[in-house]
């Protein structure tokens, strides 16, 4: 995907394109890393590329679950597993996390294409960071929130990756997509920029 989503006129497809573009930001941060590098907390933060991939997939999946009113486990199980979404387990591989993120993206697209963007999505009660005075968001609102949430973590991933080996988003994107070198940009390579 180029550095910007395409100028689509269908709102649903445009929202999905913006989510995909932000998802790619996290995916590109993982490009060329080993499993060990993906587990590396390279800054003062505990965040890792693998953990960010895992968390972004789990978060997107949870929001899509809200759209379709689907529950995975009890509230207690969900709360207990939240911190684990930020950690790439010893038995997990980067390839597995990337494939799972692809699966989540396909499910998001499938669900969104079956819904009206104005459909209500109930706001959970008793969650301190959710408003008490709003009964429901729209599917459109949820998708914009997924863009926001994913973009936040793509930014985290940029910083974590740059601290690992100096690589940054556009050279990584160019390498992942096979762009030729230009006077503007040299694709990342393990020994290069």
Image: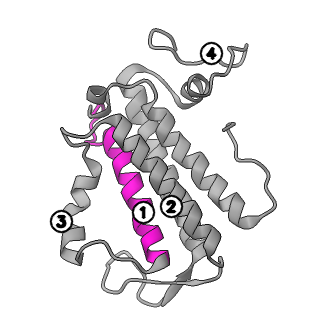
The residue singled out by tag 4 in the image is 186
Asked which secondary structure carries label 1, the reply is: helix
- 3D distance between C-alphas at marks 2 and 3: 24 Å
Mark identifier at residue 61: 1
Near mark 4 (Cα within 10 A), the count class, few <14, some 14-19 or many ≥20, is some
Q: Earlier in the sequence, mark 3 or mark 1?
A: 1
Disc 4 is placed on an element classified as loop
Comparing 17 with 4, the one in front is 17
* Residue at the spot 40% in from the left edge and 78% down from the top edge: 130
Q: How crowded is mark 2: few (under 14 residues within 10 Å), some or many (20 or more)?
A: some
Q: Position of residue 97 (x, y in %)?
A: 36, 43
Q: What stretch is highlighted in magenta?
A: 41-67
Q: Position of residue 123 (x, y in %)?
A: 44, 83
> Magenta stretch: residue 17 in it?
no
Alpha carbons under labels 4 and 3: distance apart? 44 Å
Q: Please, is residue 94 above or below residue 66 in the view?
A: above
**Earlier sequence position, callout 1 versus callout 4:** 1
Q: Which mark is residue 107?
A: 2
At a point 48% along the width and 90% down the height, the residue shown is: 135
Placement of 153 over or under 192, stated as above or below: below
């Amino acid at each position: 995907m180029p550095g910007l989503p395409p100028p689509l006129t269908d709102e649903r497809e445009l929202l999905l394109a913006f989510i995909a573009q932000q998802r790619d930001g996290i995916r590109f941060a993982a490009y060329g890393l080993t499993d060990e590098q993906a587990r590396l907390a390279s800054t003062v933060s505990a965040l890792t590329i693998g953990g960010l991939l895992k968390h972004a997939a789990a978060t997107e999946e949870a929001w899509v679950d809200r759209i379709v009113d689907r529950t995975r486990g009890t509230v207690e199980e969900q709360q207990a597993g939240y911190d684990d979404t930020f950690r790439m387990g010893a038995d997990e591989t980067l390839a597995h996390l990337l494939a799972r993120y692809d699966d989540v993206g396909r499910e998001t697209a499938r669900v969104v294409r079956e819904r009206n963007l104005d459909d209500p999505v109930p706001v959970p009660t008793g969650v301190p960071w959710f408003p008490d005075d709003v009964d429901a968001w729209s599917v459109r609102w949820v998708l914009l929130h997924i863009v926001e949430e994913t973009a936040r973590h793509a930014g985290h991933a940029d910083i974590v990756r740059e601290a690992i080996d100096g690589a940054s988003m556009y050279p990584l994107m160019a390498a992942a997509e096979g762009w030729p070198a230009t006077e503007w940009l040299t694709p990342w390579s393990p020994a290069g920029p």
